[in-house]
Amino acid sequence: MTNLSYENAIKLLTSQGKFQIKLGLERIKSVLEKLGNPQDDLKCIHVAGTNGKGSVCAILATILQEAGFKTGLYTSPHIFEYTERIKINGVEIPRETFADLVTEIVAIGEDLTEFEILTAVMFKYFANEKVDYVILETGLGGRFDATNVIKSNLCSIITHIDLDHTERLGNTRSKIAFEKAGIIKPNCPVITSEGYEEIKDAADENNSLFLLVTPFSDTTNLSLKGTYQGENLALALNCIQLLFPQIPQSIVQKALPKVQHPCRFEYHADKNLIIDGAHNPNGAVALRESLDTIFPSEPRRFIFGCLRHKDYEKMINTLFTSNDEIYFYHFDNPNSCTVEELQAVCPYPSKPYSGSEITPDKLNIICGSFYMIKELTIFEK
C-alpha cells in the first residue's frame, strides 16, 4: 500500500460509516501483535471516567514533563486536528509520521474502527520514540476500550462518573462505574474520588491498592479554571505523590500554571468569552456551577450546539435562565441537532447563531459540543 498523505489519511479515517464504534479488544489486539505489541514496552497511567479525565491527563503530563521526563499524552477528542490527540512533551505527532503509521496499520487488513487505528498509531509512535511515561485517556468506557489492551499500568485513575453513552455503557451510574473499573489491573493501584462499590470490588479482585481522595478546595495555582477542577487536581496530585515521591513540590507548583487543556472553561478576556466543551448533562451542571461561582452577576449570552443522541433538553434546562440571551448553532456533523430541534425543547426565547452576535458587553459562553468549536471563527488556534 502506497503511503498516504496526511490529508488522505484523514479522509480515510473520516469516511462516513467506515469506522463506527465497535466495542471489543480482539481487533486491536490482533493488529498490535502484528506490530510487535508496542504497548508492552510502555509505562502507562490509565485514566477513565465520564467527565474530567482530559484535565487529569493534562495535569499529569505537564508535571512529568516539568520534572524532566519524556512524556507521551493520548487524549480525545481533538478540536482542530487529529494530531492533537497524540503528543510528546506537548508537541503533536508530525503529520507525515501520523500518515505513515495510519498507512502501515490500515495495510494490515483488520476491520478497525477510527479510534482503534488512532490508538494503534499512538502505541507504535510512543514505543518508537521511547517515551518514559504515557498518560493514557480512554475513549469510551474502559473495559472494552481500545486503550485497555495494556496488560498492566502504573496506576488507574477513575474520574467523576455520570450518565453518558448509556446506550453502550448502561443506564445507571453503577453499570457505568463497572465499565470504567475495567481498566483496573492486577496489583496496580487505583485512585478515584467516588466510592462506587463496583470500583472497590474490582480493586479487591485485582489485589489493587484502592485510594479514595477528597477534592481540593484551592486550585488557585492551576491554570485550568472551573469549580470542578478541585476533584481533577486532587486525583492528579495524589497520583504523582504515590508514583513519583521524588518529584519536589517546587516542580509540581511550577507546572500547574503551565497546564493547557483547551475548551474547558477557557476564558478569553478580550472577547469576554468562555469556551467549554460541556457535552453531557453532568458537564452542563459543572459549567453552570462554575459560571454561578466565578461570574455570579454578569449577564450571559450562550451559543449552544449539541449532538442529537445527547440529553440536550436536560442540558438546556440546566444551563439557561429567562435572563439569558440564547443562540443555537447547527454544526457540520450528521448527528448535530438542528436549531429547530433545540428550540423545540427550550423554554426561553432563542435565535439561530449567525456568527456576529458575540460582543464583550455580556459574558459569552460557547458550549455543548467539541465538534462545533472548530467551525466558529470567533475561536482560532
Image (cartoon, rainbow, N blue to C red):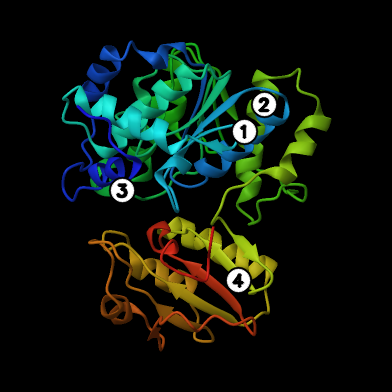
Would you say the residues marked 2 and 1 are in contact, meaning their CB atoms lie under 8 Å apart? yes
- Which residue is tagged 1? 60
Callout 1: helix, strand or loop? Answer: helix
- Does residue 206 appear in this view? yes
Disc on the earlier residue, 1 or 3? 1
Q: Earlier in the sequence, mark 4 or mark 3?
A: 3
Calculate the distance from the C-alpha at mark 4 to the C-alpha at mark 3.
29 Å
Q: Nearer the viewer, residue 134 or 166?
A: 134
Tell me if residue 145 can be seen.
Answer: no
At horizontal 68% and vertical 32% (from top left) the residue drawn is: 63
Q: Secondary structure at mark 4?
A: strand
Query: If the image is split into quadrants, where does the N terminus sit?
Result: top left
The residue that appears at 48% across and 70% down in the rendered structure is 377
- Identify the residue under disc 2: 240
Residue type highlighted by circle 2: Ile
What whole-number distance in Å separates the C-alpha atoms at marks 4 and 1?
27 Å
- Amino acid type, label 3: His
Q: Earlier in the sequence, mark 2 or mark 3?
A: 3
Q: Is residue 327 left or right of residue 56?
A: left
Task: State how far apart marks 2 and 3 are (Cα).
Answer: 30 Å
- The residue that disc 3 covers is 165
Give neighbour class at mark 1: few <14, some 14-19, many 20+ (Cα, 10 Å).
Answer: many
Residue 377's tag is none
CA distance separating discs 2 and 4: 33 Å
Contact between labelled residues 3 and 2, with CB atoms less than 8 Å apart: no
Whichever of labels 2 and 4 marks the residue nearer the N terminus, that label is 2
